[in-house]
Image: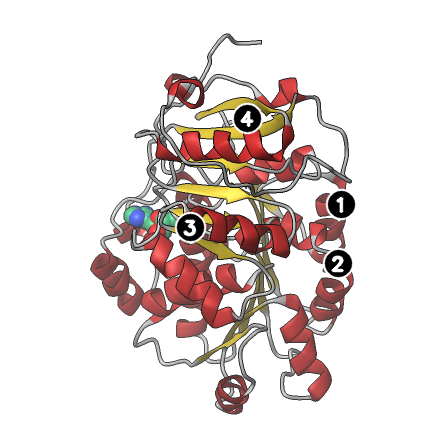
Amino acid sequence: MPGYKYSVYNSAKRNTGNRRSGGGNKRRGEYINPERFIKAATPMEETLYESKHKFADFAVATIIHDNLTAKGYETPSAIQDQTIALGLEGNDVIGIADTGTGKTAAFAVPIINQIVTSQNSRALIVAPTRELAQQIEDECRSIGKGGGFTGALLIGGTGMGTQLRDLKNKPRLVIGTPGRIKDHMERGTLKLDLFNLVVLDEVDRMLDMGFVNDVSFILDSMAPIRQSFFFSATMDPRVQGLIRTFSKDPKTVSVKSGETGANIHQDVVRFSGTHEKMEKLHDLLISNEVAKVIVFDETQRNVEKLSNELITRGFKADAIHGGKSQGQRQRALDNFKGNRTNVLVATDVAARGIDVSDITHVINYSQPQSYQDYVHRIGRAGRAGNVGYAITFVSK
Ligand code: AMP
């Protein structure tokens, strides 16, 4: 085991009184040996990817070139460099990549080019969470601006009014979460039989969240001859199974560096009892190194309670969980992105798809249910090649 120790939480000094908060250390998921939460970062081993193309080289519509230039996209990231070329040739593509690698534009460029250049092309993009669907929509909107097509964003937690109006316009780009897409299909407000392009983003999360039947139902309703893009951070047998069922001779592009969380310092904080746990969290949060942090806790109730406790203690904290309305979740995310808060307390589900590039720390105030969840959590830090920190609370 590497000897690296992230020791700031042992040395911070402050006086906070004697408040209590936080839960115990009860867990229901798989047992994970705490040793697995300790690992030094090895960012030096990362090699810089040399792109074979410039965006200017891709044979896409002028309007897309213009929009990419306006966005400041000049050199493609690794996943973009390889996926865009394969996608433009009409291949089914499997992309193994995390959020933060530029995967959105990797599928958005070929898909939007197809929509812009062929009136008969229609695309569906399915994402596991509302936040991710919203981020994809923002990216697609800016890449496809002025392209002569309309879109619809179909996510839960928001009213049906706008969605029904957008669907009446016969959108050729539909982005959404599985539940709401299926809902519209069952109401008869969305017909997919002419949709010949599909993206499944974060397939592994989608399966983790129990969407396998919804996703299969959706794909079965699409045009039988279609081009598919599958993106996933991990490639386990379930993901492979789904892709095998729904793809045709796919080409795989992987930009994973191999080792999980290679650029993330991982360590544990040991505590006994809820009081010490809270105090150690406080120590951690007041240290200078902790600039922007996601704190994971287990239930909506605990997340709310912990966030309130941190606010009482003077931290710029907010909570994000499934019990909040879409508007509240978006506001919490905007405040966090805009540095009006710097501590976001979250449940696993609510944190999925959060793309905030300058998160320095992930704190697992309660342990994840599985090692795979752990890997997803810590991947929120250390984005864009930065070194990040992941600290997991472990009962003594
Ligand atoms: P993604 O992984 O798709 O969520 O993208 C991560 C962030 O990188 C987003 O804020 C994108 O706007 C940005 N981005 C993606 N591709 C490029 C690129 N080729 N050049 C500059 N910024 C990019």
Question: Which colour scheme appears in the figure?
Answer: secondary structure
Residue at disc 2, secondary structure: helix
State the separation of the CA atoms marked 1 and 4. 20 Å
Instruction: List the residue tagged with mark 1.
Output: 238
* Contact flag, marks 4 and 3 (Cβ < 8 Å): no
> First in sequence: mark 2 or mark 1?
2
Where residue 93 appears, as percent x and y from the top left, is: 57, 50
Marker disc for residue 258:
4
Q: Judge left or right: residue 366 versus residue 210.
A: left
Instruction: List the residue tagged with mark 2.
Output: 212
Characterize the local packing of mark 3: few (<14), some (14-19) or many (20 or more) Cα atoms within 10 angstroms: few
Residue at disc 4, secondary structure: loop
* Contact flag, marks 2 and 1 (Cβ < 8 Å): yes
* Contact flag, marks 1 and 4 (Cβ < 8 Å): no
The answer to whether residue 352 is seen in the rendering is: no
* Quadrant of res 13: top left
Residue drawn at the location 44% of the way across and 19% of the way down: 10
Residue at disc 3, secondary structure: helix
Nearest the eye: 4 or 195: 4
State the separation of the CA atoms marked 2 and 1. 9 Å
Judge depth for marks 2 and 3 and give the one in front.
Answer: 3
What type is the residue that disc 3 sits on? Thr
State the separation of the CA atoms marked 1 and 3. 44 Å
Where residue 271 appears, as percent x and y from the top left, is: 59, 25
Residue drawn at the location 28% of the way across and 59% of the way down: 68
